[in-house]
Image (spheres, rainbow, N blue to C red):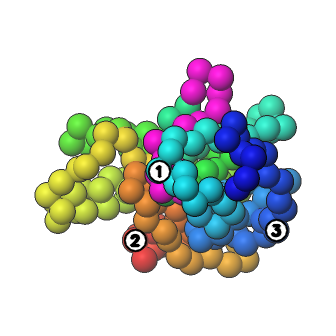
Amino acid sequence: MSGAANGAEIEYEILAMLPGPYGADLTSRHAFFNLAEILVYPVDERSGSVLIGFRDIPTNWKIATTLDQSPAGDFTAQNYDRLVDSPVEISAFEEVHFDEGGVYYRVVVDADRGDYDLGKLVPVTKKIVAAETAWMNDRPFRTYLFLCHFPRDSGGGGMEHAYSTAIEVNAQVLADNPWRLLT
């Protein structure tokens, strides 16, 4: 890009109406971003450090991501690939955490509170973690994030990332059998 030696600002619009772990969804209820689906990068600077910020967030919403937060409140990544491998949930989500084998695990749920029971989800998640890490015989991270969505009208799928997983399971399917979180 000619004339951008000191940086450039690019504006573009996206349609964020693809719920689920693979896309981007922005509603009055929440924002979920699989950043690989919505961000561009300068070809010559893909390996450079990145700073991303989220603005005009409702006061009762929080941000869940595995990106590092800067003192100014923005988020940083050492390069574009790390950035887009870090999905983001912004909402009034519910969160629990636990430690397992020296790793800090966060479970973030954005769904209607009556459609899930964290008391049932956390033991299932702990068993998944124990089985997966025993199978892999490795924990290449210090923290890990589960981003869970339980919609009433659809649901089904998950997308694994280096330090997180985005999961979508239909609320009724989950209510009938919390172990469906596995499938």
| For marks 2 and 1 on the same chain, the one whose residue lies earlier in the sequence | 1
The residue shown at (58%, 68%) is: 21
Q: What is the x, y in percent for residue 38?
A: 69, 63
Measuring from the top left, give residue 133's x and y in whole percent: 22, 57
Could you tell me how far apart the alpha carbons at marks 2 and 3 are, in whole angstroms?
A: 30 Å
Q: Nearer the viewer, mark 2 or mark 3?
A: 3
Q: Which region shows up in magenta?
A: 70-84
In the rendered image, the quadrant that contains the C terminus is bottom left
Query: Magenta span has 47?
Result: no
Q: Residue furthest front?
A: 2
Please state the horizontal and vertical placement of residue 142, each as a whole percent of the image: 31, 39
Secondary structure of the residue carrying tag 1 is loop
Q: Position of residue 97 (x, y in %)?
A: 43, 39
Please state which amino acid type lies under the numbered disc 3: Leu
Mark number displayed over residue 180: none
The image's mark for residue 15 is: 3
Q: Which residue is mark 1?
A: 47
Amino acid residing under circle 2: Leu
Considering only vertical position in the picture, is 9 above or below 153?
above
Q: Which residue is mark 2?
A: 182
Instruction: Give me the C-alpha separation between circle 3 and circle 1.
Output: 27 Å
Residue drawn at x 70%, y 70% is 19
Mark 2 residue element? helix
